[in-house]
Image (cartoon, rainbow, N blue to C red):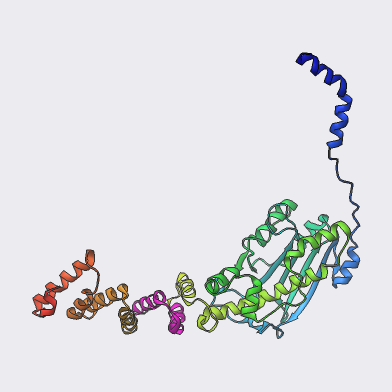
Amino acid sequence: MDLKQRLAALRQQTGHACIAERIQRYRVGPPPARACRPVDASALAERLGGSLRAGGVIRIERRVALDDVHGARCLARVLDDHGALPEARGLDPGRLVFVDTETSGLAGGTGTVVFLLGLARIEDGALQIRQYLLTGFAGEAVLLTESAKWLGNDDTLVSFNGKCFDVPLLAARCRLAGVADPFSTRGHLDLLHPTRRAFNRYWPDCRLGTAEQRLLGFARTDDLPGSEAPQAWLDLLRRGDATRMPGIARHNHRDLVSLAALLPALVDAHAVPAEHGADALAVARAHLARDDEARARAVLTAARARLDSGALLELARLHRRNGDWNAACIIWERLAEKGSLESIERLAKYYEHVRGDHAVAFDYARRLPLGGVHDSRRQRLRRKLEKLGKLGSDHRSC
């Protein structure tokens, strides 16, 4: 039997219907429809102590007295002057709105929904907190527009990593919902950035939880981690299971109170870094970026006993710019004894151009490496000493 005959015989044995049946056995059909239990929004609102708004949005309002203590921090400190924190300089405490979100996903993107938006501000002598909880997709526009009504034109948002996550996500949801975006158009103080600046060298990480423990003395108990929020909300939508929603609302509430307490704590750390375990040089450079040399100099002076050579050189530079040559020279001389070439060069320049003591300047210049500008300085000083008749025998070999 040739090949054609064998193929024809096989086709007759299998048949098209048999092949179709075989294919059907391997075909994966759609999963059976999962029954979704409706969310009892009214019952959930009552359980959370909130009120039910249009679209199934629940609004929760809380009041925290400013004389309350959060960890080891009194909340009333949020009213203090914030001038020591460069980013907060000139901000009115009464125009600050603390913001934190819980979302359906932790990676962001257009598919991520803000299902819980928490806002807090100082009103009537207390920290007033409002939380908007979404119990279904249909209420998203209501959540966004209602929360926007609580924002004034001159308000500044205060967040922790909100510049990269919360606010861009809220802005994206506003665009998709077809409502005005009140979030990205306002000033924004993201406390993550000054936290990293001050403590990145010394802390294992700069997460909000770490800042709470180390700066606020606040340790969370019975707290539902934010990482569980997406699944908790999906359980609410798919099965009407609201078991974890009070924990999510409590977690968000604590985030907002921590933001209010963290702001003055960071102000303190930027005022006197040495007393709070902060990076004095990084803090000083932040003040310099805002043209505040006096504060930068004060910060480094207070931390002088803990400064490394780089920070000491920066302090000496600031003393020089302030005309305090004596203070600058004390630092340079200390570092020169340890072999700091930059300090030796600074002293050579100081004695040549400021003091006019060419002999001492030449002594320092001789300690600099051979070549380039250092050779030129030595030759220039030698000529000056020869002209003045002050070139000693110990100088002639140099």
Give residue 289's position: percent from left, percent from top.
46, 69
> Does residue 42 belong to the magenta stretch?
no
**15 over 225 or under it: above or below:** above
Say which residue appears at 78% left-offset and 65% top-offset: 132
Q: Is residue 167 above or below residue 323?
A: above
Q: Locate the C terminus and report the quarter of the image it occupies.
A: bottom left
- Where residue 85 appears, as percent x and y from the top left, is 54, 75
Q: How many marks?
A: 0
The N terminus, quarter of image: top right
Q: Nearer the viewer, residue 71 or 210?
A: 210
Kindly tell me whether residue 93 is visible in this rendering: no
Asked which quadrant contains residue 125, the reply is bottom right
Residues in magenta, as a range: 294-322
Q: Nearer the viewer, residue 15 or 265?
A: 15
Task: Tell me the quarter of the picture where residue 158 sits.
Answer: bottom right
In the image: residue 339, left or right of residue 133: left
Query: In the visual, does 128 lie left or right of 73?
Result: right
Residue shown at 55%/82% (left/top)? 276
Up the image or down, 54 lies above or below 68; here it is: above
Residue 321 colored in magenta in the image: yes
Q: Main secondary structure of the magenta part?
A: helix
Q: Please state the horizontal and vertical placement of residue 37, each as a whole percent of the image.
A: 91, 57
Residue 321 x %, y % = 35, 76
Does residue 373 appear left or right of residue 121 in this picture? Answer: left
In-front residue for pair 302/334: 334
The answer to whether residue 258 of the structure is visible from this angle is yes
